[in-house]
């Protein structure tokens, strides 16, 4: 067993570069401070925004119509 010095490896979430989990990469899991700032910037902007949420205004209008229909149906 002479590989006790080997450090675990991981991929930088920003650029995908394989780095070593060691003091050599103080910004881990990012390979560099630049990648860490880029990732943070992406979160701050709308890059990670998940679209597809229905507009609640339309839903309310639908509800209103349902309410009227229900009233007519008894
Ligand atoms: Zn990177």
Image (cartoon, rainbow, N blue to C red):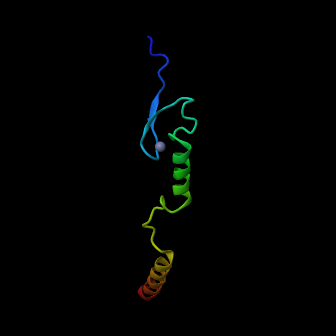
**Residue at image point 54% right, 29% down:** 22
Given residues 60 and 24, the one toward you in this image is 24
Image quarter of the C terminus: bottom left
Q: Residue furthest bottom?
A: 72
Look at the picture and state if 33 lies above or below 66: above
Q: Give whichever of 8, 62 is nearer the camera.
A: 8
Image x and y of residue 41, in percent: 55, 56
Q: Is residue 66 above or below residue 21?
A: below
Relative to 30, does residue 46 appear above or below in the rendering? Answer: below
Q: Percent position (x, y) of residue 53?
A: 45, 68
Q: Residue at x 50, y 63 (%)?
A: 46
Residue nearer the viewer, 23 or 48: 23
- Where is residue 40 shown, x and y percent of the image? 55, 52
Task: Count the numbered circles shown.
Answer: 0
Q: Quadrant of the N terminus?
A: top left
Where residue 70 sits, quadrant-wise, is bottom left
Identify the residue shown where x is 42% and y is 67%: 52
Residue at the top extreme of this rendering? 1
Residue 25 position, x and y percent, is: 54, 34
């Amino acid at each position: 067993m002479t590989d006790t010095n080997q450090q675990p490896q991981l991929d930088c979430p920003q650029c995908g570069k394989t780095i070593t989990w060691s003091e050599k990469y103080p910004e881990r899991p990012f390979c560099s401070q630049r990648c860490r700032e880029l990732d943070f910037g992406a979160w701050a902007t709308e890059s990670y925004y998940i679209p597809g949420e229905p507009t609640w205004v339309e839903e309310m209008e639908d509800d209103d119509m349902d309410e009227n229909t229900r009233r007519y149906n008894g």
